[in-house]
Amino acid sequence: MSAVPLVEYKDASPEVRAVYDDIMATRKTDWINNFWKALANDPATLRRTWESIKEVMAPGAIDPAVKELIYLAVSITNGCQYCMHSHGAAAKKLGMTKQAFGELAAIVGMANETNRLATGYQVEVDERFRV
Amino acid sequence: MSAVPLVEYKDASPEVRAVYDDIMATRKTDWINNFWKALANDPATLRRTWESIKEVMAPGAIDPAVKELIYLAVSITNGCQYCMHSHGAAAKKLGMTKQAFGELAAIVGMANETNRLATGYQVEVDERFRV
Amino acid sequence: MSAVPLVEYKDASPEVRAVYDDIMATRKTDWINNFWKALANDPATLRRTWESIKEVMAPGAIDPAVKELIYLAVSITNGCQYCMHSHGAAAKKLGMTKQAFGELAAIVGMANETNRLATGYQVEVDERFRV
Amino acid sequence: MSAVPLVEYKDASPEVRAVYDDIMATRKTDWINNFWKALANDPATLRRTWESIKEVMAPGAIDPAVKELIYLAVSITNGCQYCMHSHGAAAKKLGMTKQAFGELAAIVGMANETNRLATGYQVEVDERFRV
Amino acid sequence: MSAVPLVEYKDASPEVRAVYDDIMATRKTDWINNFWKALANDPATLRRTWESIKEVMAPGAIDPAVKELIYLAVSITNGCQYCMHSHGAAAKKLGMTKQAFGELAAIVGMANETNRLATGYQVEVDERFRV
Amino acid sequence: MSAVPLVEYKDASPEVRAVYDDIMATRKTDWINNFWKALANDPATLRRTWESIKEVMAPGAIDPAVKELIYLAVSITNGCQYCMHSHGAAAKKLGMTKQAFGELAAIVGMANETNRLATGYQVEVDERFRV
C-alpha cells in the first residue's frame, strides 16, 4: 500500500484550504506540515483532527509549553517517528532546551521501566491513593 | 504465580531500611507505598530504582510538578493501574487540579490518536523538522 | 544483528517449496512476498504461521475483506510497517477504497484515543455490558 | 488518585445534558453508559469526543457493524477492559455472533503475532506493496 | 460483553476433549487451565493455538525453562495479567527461583526504559551491528 | 527535532570518558556503540543508565546469555529497531545461533498472540496460579 499523496495548498479544495488557513493563522506560521497534507485526503478527518488539536492544545490549566512536553512523551512511548519530530519541534519553539529534553527522555524511560516493574510484581494499589 | 509479599519496615533488613528512610526523608512523608515494599523483595532493584527515580524526578530544567504530569501521561498510555494511582496522587499533591487532569487526559488521548494517524498514513517527516 | 537472508524459490528446500506452492495456489498469485521468504529461514515457523494464517483468514462468519480491515487496524495500532503494507495491499485487492481506508484510519485513531480516556478516567464497566 | 465521580443526568449541567440527549437520540436508547458520565467531568472533552465518535462511527464506505469490529479489535490489542466491554456489546447489538467473535479474536491474535515476526526478522517491504 | 463460559471436560465435544487429553499428556498433569477452557468456545482456535504452543515451547536450541522466562518477559511488557500468572507458574515449575524472577523483572524494566531512550534520542544503528 | 549529535571519545568530558572507559573495560571491547554516544549529551542519564545496565546484566541467577535473549524479546515486542540490533548482536556474541533466534522469534510471536487471546476472552486467573 503506497502512502497517500500530500495535498498542497494550490491543489486543495475550498474546504481543505479553510482548515489550512486556520492552522496557519492559529500557529502564526506560513506553512503546513505533512501531517495535515496527508490527512487532507480525508477532509472530514482533517477538519475534525485539527479542531480537536486546536482545542486540546490551547492555553488552559496547563501551559501550552507543558502540553507539548506531554505530547512528546506519549509519542516517544509509542515510537511514532513523525510525532516525535513534529511535537519535538513545537516543544523547542516553546522553549524546550537541550537539558529539558534530556530530562524528559529520562522520565519517559523511567516511567516505562517502573510501569513494567509495578505490573510484573503485581503491586496492589495503596488505600491512600484511592481516597 | 502469586504476587510477592510486601516487606514492612519492621521486617526489613538494614539495607532495605536505609532505602525506606531515604524515601521518607526525601519525600517528607512518614509512610512507604506498596511499590517499594514489593521491590524490597529484590534489594538491589529497590535501591537502584529508588536512586534513579530520585535523580530523575529532582528539580531541574523541568519543574517537579510538570515531571509528575509527564510520568502520569506515560502511565495512562501504558495502562499501568498502579502507576496511574501513585503518580496521579503525586501530581495532585504538587498542584494538579481536576481541570488540569482533564486537560492532561485529553492530550494523552489526542496523542495516542494522532500517533496512529501519522503511522497509518505513513507521513514523511518534514525537512524543516529535521534541522 | 543483520536481517536474515530471503530464501528464494529456486534455493528453497522441498519443505519450504511446498509451503510456497500452497501460498501461491491459495492466493491465486505467482509470487511470494518477503515475509514468507524471511520466515523460510525457520521452516517450522514458516509452515506453522502459514497454516494458521490460511485458517484464520479463510471465509467464515466474517468476510475475508473485513478480516483484512481488522488485520490492518491492528497493524497500524502496533506500528508494524511491513504488516501495514502487506495487509493494506491485500485489503485494497479485496475492495478497500481510498474512502474506506480513511474511515478505517479514523476509527483506529479514535479507538486509541478513547482506550486511553477510559483507562485514564478509570471508568468502571457498566453492569449492562456484563450480561 | 481516586476515579472521577460519574455525572448522572439529573445532576448534569445543560451543556452536559445536551450531549447526553444527543447520545440517546443517535443511539436510540434510554441510558448513558459510564464512559460518558466520567468524561462529563470535563464537558469540553465530553462534547468533542462524542462529536468525533458520532462522525467516525456513522454509516459510510464501511458498514457500522464492521466499524464496531475494528474498534473492538484495537481495544483488545491495547488491553482496554472498558472498551472491550462497551464495543463488544455494541458489536453484538449490530449482529456479531459468538462465531464471529471467535474469528475476530483469532485475527487479533495472529496480527499481534505476525506484527512481531515481521519486526523481529526485519522484513523489508516488497516493491510491489509500495506501488 | 460478558466473558465466554468455560468449557469443562465433561461437557466438551470429542474434538475439544482430544485437545484437552493431549495438553494433559504433554504436560504430565491432570487438569486444564482456564485459558484452554475459554478457547474451547472456538474449537478451531483451541486446536491451532495448542498445536502451535506445543511446537514452539518444545525443547530445541533454547531450553524449555528459558523459553518460559522469555514468554513471561513479553507478557509483563504487554501487561497481560492472565499470561503473567500462567507463564509465571510454568517458569517456577521449571526452576525459576525468587531471585531469578527479580532479575527477570529488572531486565524487563531496563529493556522498556532503554527502548524508549533509543527511540527518543533517535539513535542510528551502528554499522558493526548490521554486519 | 533533529537527532542529538554523537559524542566521540576525543571530544568527551572527563565525566563521560570515565563511563566510556568503564563500558569498554567491562565489555572487553575497544569501541563505544551509538546508544552511549547519544546519551552522553546528558551525562547524568549516561552514567545512571550504564550503572543500571551493568548491574542488571551481570551474571546472577540468570545466565548473561539468557539475559540477552530476554532483552531481545522485549525489544522486538516494543518494535525498537536500535535495541533489536544492539541486543541481537550481544546475544549472538554470547552464543545465540540462527536456530535459537528462530525459536526466540517464534516465542515472541506466540506470546503476543496469546496475550491478546487471554485478554480478548477475558480469561479469569486460575486459583492454582495464585497460590
Image: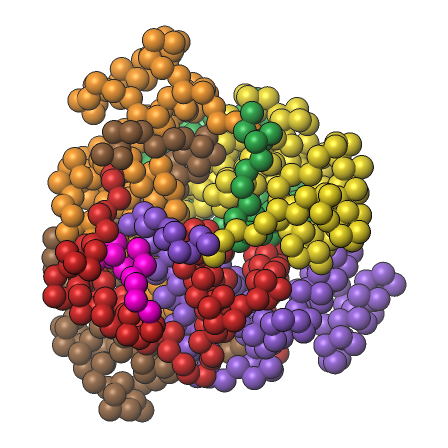
Chain colours: A yellow, B green, C red, D purple, E brown, F orange
Would you say E93 lies left or right of D53 here? left
Is A63 located above or below residue B39 in the figure?
above
Would you say F100 lies left or right of B20 here? left
Residue F65 seen from this side? yes
- Where in the figure is residue E110, as x and y percent of width and height? 36, 38
Residue E126: name its quadrant: top left
Front-most of B117 and D61? D61
Residue C111 seen from this side? no
Front-most of E122 and C6? C6
Q: Residue at x 39, y 63 (%)?
A: D111
Q: Residue at x 32, y 59 (%)?
A: C33
Is A110 located above or below residue B84 in the figure?
above
Residue E25: name its quadrant: bottom left
- Where in the figure is residue C77, as x and y percent of width and height? 49, 56
Residue C49 part of the magenta-drawn span: no
- Where in the figure is residue E3, as x and y percent of width and height? 47, 77
Quadrant in the picture for the N terminus of chain F: top right
Front-most of F63 and F91? F91
Q: Residue at x 30, y 25 (%)?
A: F33
Quadrant in the picture for the C terminus of chain F: bottom left
Q: Which residues are magenta?
A: C29-40
Is A52 located above or below residue F26 in the figure?
below
Residue C34 part of the magenta-drawn span: yes
Q: Residue at x 27, y 66 (%)?
A: C49
- Where in the figure is residue C117, as x and y percent of width and height? 62, 56
Count of numbered marks:
0
Is C6 located above or below residue A113 in the figure?
below
